[in-house]
Image: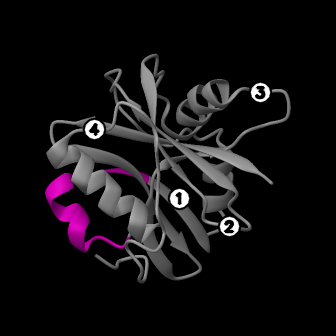
Amino acid sequence: MRSAVRAIIINNGNLLVMHRNKFGEQYYTLVGGGVDIGESKEQALVREVSEETGLKIQKYKLVFIEEPGDPYGTQHIYLCDYPGGDASLPDSSPEAEISKLGKNIYRIEWIPIEKLPEAPFLSAALKQYILHAVSDGFPDQPLTIDPTKYRGEINGS
């Protein structure tokens, strides 16, 4: 099964997200993507964050693992220190190229964590785990996300 990495990057009470407009369905997701053959999860994390935001992360810790099923595969979610600088989708990224076609659009945004509860977010369970961790602290050891704990639509609470 495929493996992917995602980054939780927080700065001044804002969460860095990828805003998606996928053929009219709009939602937020964490920055990240698939692990390439021969690449470690950590190498993939650094590469994906750089490709999608231009940021060069150096400090990160695995905090959650999610099994959303096909086609997404196992998601390894890392809490990353914000390295400073402007986050924007580089023109050379695959996401920018896809966005140029105008039907499947990617956009990097910072959203206030206080607005996250009502934001459409993929996945609803991951959103709840992030919200709990922001208020109670991120785990020292990675937690496996229980998809049955927070069922619902991508904007479900």
SS at circle 3: loop
According to the image, label 4 marks what residue? 10
- Crowding around mark 1 (Cα neighbors within 10 Å: few <14, some 14 to 19, many 20+) is many
According to the image, label 1 marks what residue? 106
Residue type marked 2: Gly
Cα separation between marks 3 and 2: 21 Å
Q: Is residue 147 magenta?
A: no
SS at circle 2: loop
Cα separation between marks 4 and 2: 27 Å
Callout 3–callout 2 Cβ contact below 8 Å: no
Q: How is the image coloured?
A: one colour
Residue 69 tag number: 2
Q: Is residue 126 above or below residue 27?
A: above
SS at circle 4: strand
Q: Position of residue 102 (x, y in %)?
A: 60, 70
| N-term mark: 3 or 1 | 3
Q: Is residue 114 magenta?
A: yes
